[in-house]
Every structure is written in C-alpha cells, then in structure tokens.
C-alpha cells in the first residue's frame, strides 16, 4: 500500500485464478466496493466478440474501489466468507489519488478535423474554424467521438461525399456522431439505429446539442420501416456482425447507393467484402492502423 495517508481512495485488486471474474466482482460489491473494474492480467486482446457475448480475458484482474477510511482487513474477511475461501486469491492494495476526472479528459480531448471542413469539437472548446462543419460532442457512455481509427475513417468519408438531399442510415450509431455529421453535411433525413438504449439516448442528446434533431430519426433495428430504402448506409460495427447483416443491408440500399462499412480489422476485410459481394461492388479498402473501411456501390 502507498504511504500517502491523504489519498481518498483505496483499490483492492485480485487475480481471477480459482474464482471467476464475476464471482470476484460480486464479492467485492457485497463487501462494500463503490465500483469494480475488470482488466487484462496478461497481454490478450479481446476482438470480434459474437453478438450478445461479453468476452473476458483468460487471465483477468478484478479491482474494487473503496473509501480510504475502509478497514481492508474486514473487507478481506468478508471476501473470504462470500467466496467460501479460507485463503484469498493473490491481492494487492494501493492508494488512489484524488483527480478531477472530467478535467482529465477535457485536457486530452481537443477539436479534431476530418477531411477538409468537418470538425468534432468538445463543448468546452471554441471551434477552430467557425465557418467549417462543426459537430459539438463530448465523451459519454456511448462509443464514438472520432478518436478511434474506424470512426475517423467514416468521418473522412462523409466529409468527401455529396450528401445533399440524401437519405442516410447510420446502423450502430453509438454516440450519434456519424448521423449528426451526415445531417450537418446536408443529408435530408438520417436514421440513427442501435440495439443499445443508452446509445439512442446519447444520440438524441447530441443531436439536440447540434441543432439537427429535426432531421434525425432514432430507432431500434426492429423499429425501422419495412420499406425504408437509403442512399447511403453507414455501419461502424464489428466484422462478424456486419457479415450477419449482409442480407438486411442489401435490401436497405437503393440501386446505385453507397454502403460504407468500418469497424473491420484488416485481416477480416476479405471475408466481409465477400459476404456483400453479390449486391455491392467495392472500391479498394481504405486503411488506418489495423483497421479498414470498405466503400461499396449497390449493383
């Protein structure tokens, strides 16, 4: 443990060896943890989970956050009792300094330009280019601020496209960043779709912040109109899910319309392209780090 007695938080970290991460998480919460986080205890990336799965690492580290005044020896006794374990898994106690976490991300999240005119600007900053297309967006519970390569690829594609009077479908909208950008770039109507209610709430709030709520329709995939046909369909989601959605996307894009797929690791690009090959003709993939964007035209 740190010698800094003024630190307001304590972290108790356990290795998930003889117990599952879920068991350790439940035990820490029962013992009074204010929050619990799970992290990779080795060096094992988790990519491409199947739909509905919550993947974990083979070796997982589980950390509980406690108030500094907590008697950790009492906590350890409770953990042994909850886990029915005479000896606890290997554990480590550390002190955590107080930080202004909001200020921490604000210091690291700055306006970003995508293409020639599209900017993603946090709400605490003035837009660097007031005459540009500025999307005001802060990090939140839903994914998507432009910092990830897959989102950046999609935003750059949107900046280069002619969206005037187009109908756009953002499938897997997350924060709504792509849907909002499309609306600000001239799309007549944008459908923002996600299976996560939190994503739809975030997209709704962000659309309102950007003054485009009147042109964005929010929906669960099951709520899409049966006959909805779009000029452009964007999907920044995982490759395995994209492959499953190939028939649905094929019928949602008009003849001559565009399909923009991202969220794809480079080694999966051929498989994704093959799944859509019957309905779409693709341009060469665009790559950023280990990720690619596929741009297809409906036959």
Image (cartoon, rainbow, N blue to C red):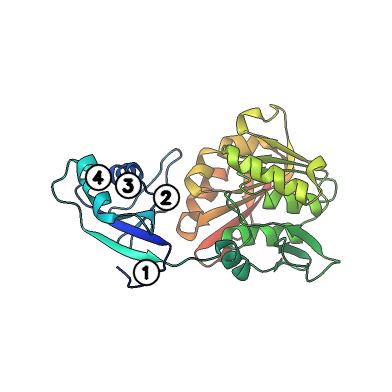
x and y, in percent, of residue 200 in the image: 64, 40
Q: Earlier in the sequence, mark 3 or mark 1?
A: 1
Q: Residue under circle 1?
A: 5
Q: Earlier in the sequence, mark 3 or mark 2?
A: 3
Tag 2 secondary structure: strand
Outermost residue to the left = 86
Residue at mark 1 to residue at mark 2: CA–CA distance: 21 Å
Which dot, 4 or 2, sits closer to the camera? 4
Residue at mark 4 to residue at mark 1: CA–CA distance: 24 Å
Residue at mark 4 to residue at mark 2: CA–CA distance: 17 Å
Q: Earlier in the sequence, mark 4 or mark 1?
A: 1
Q: Residue at horizontal 33%, vertical 71%? A: 2
Q: Residue under circle 4?
A: 78
Tag 3 secondary structure: helix
Q: Which mark is residue 35?
A: 2
Tag 4 secondary structure: helix
Query: Can see residue 298?
Result: no
Give the tally of numbered discs: 4
The image quadrant that residue 294 belongs to is bottom right
Q: Earlier in the sequence, mark 4 or mark 2?
A: 2
Q: Residue at horizontal 22%, vertical 42%? A: 83
């Amino acid at each position: 443990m740190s010698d800094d007695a003024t630190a307001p938080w304590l972290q108790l970290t356990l290795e998930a060896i003889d117990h599952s991460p879920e068991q350790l998480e439940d035990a820490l919460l029962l013992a009074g943890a204010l929050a619990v986080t799970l992290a990779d205890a080795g060096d094992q990336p988790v990519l491409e989970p199947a739909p509905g799965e919550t993947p974990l690492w083979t070796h997982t580290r589980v950390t509980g956050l406690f108030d500094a005044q907590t008697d950790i020896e009492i906590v350890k006794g409770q953990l042994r009792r909850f886990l029915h374990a005479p000896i606890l898994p290997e554990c480590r106690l550390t002190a955590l300094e107080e930080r202004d976490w909001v200020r921490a991300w604000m210091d690291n999240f700055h306006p970003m330009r995508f293409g020639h005119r599209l900017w993603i600007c946090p709400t605490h900053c003035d837009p660097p280019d007031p005459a540009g297309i500025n999307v005001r967006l802060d990090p939140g519970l839903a994914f998507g601020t432009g910092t990830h390569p897959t989102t950046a690829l999609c935003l750059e594609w949107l900046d280069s496209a002619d969206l005037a009077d187009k109908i756009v479908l953002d499938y897997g909208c997350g924060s709504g960043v792509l849907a909002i950008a499309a609306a600000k770039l001239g799309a007549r109507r944008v459908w923002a779709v996600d299976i996560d209610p939190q994503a739809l709430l975030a997209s709704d709030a962000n659309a309102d912040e950007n003054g485009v709520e009147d042109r964005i329709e929010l929906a669960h995939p099951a709520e899409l109109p049966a006959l909805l046909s779009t000029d452009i369909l964007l999907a920044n989601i995982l490759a395995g899910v994209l492959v499953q959605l190939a028939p649905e996307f094929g019928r949602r894009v008009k003849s001559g319309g565009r399909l923009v797929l991202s969220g794809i690791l480079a080694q999966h690009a051929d498989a994704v392209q093959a799944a859509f090959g019957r309905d779409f003709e693709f341009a060469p993939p665009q790559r950023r780090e280990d990720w690619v964007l596929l741009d297809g035209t409906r036959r």
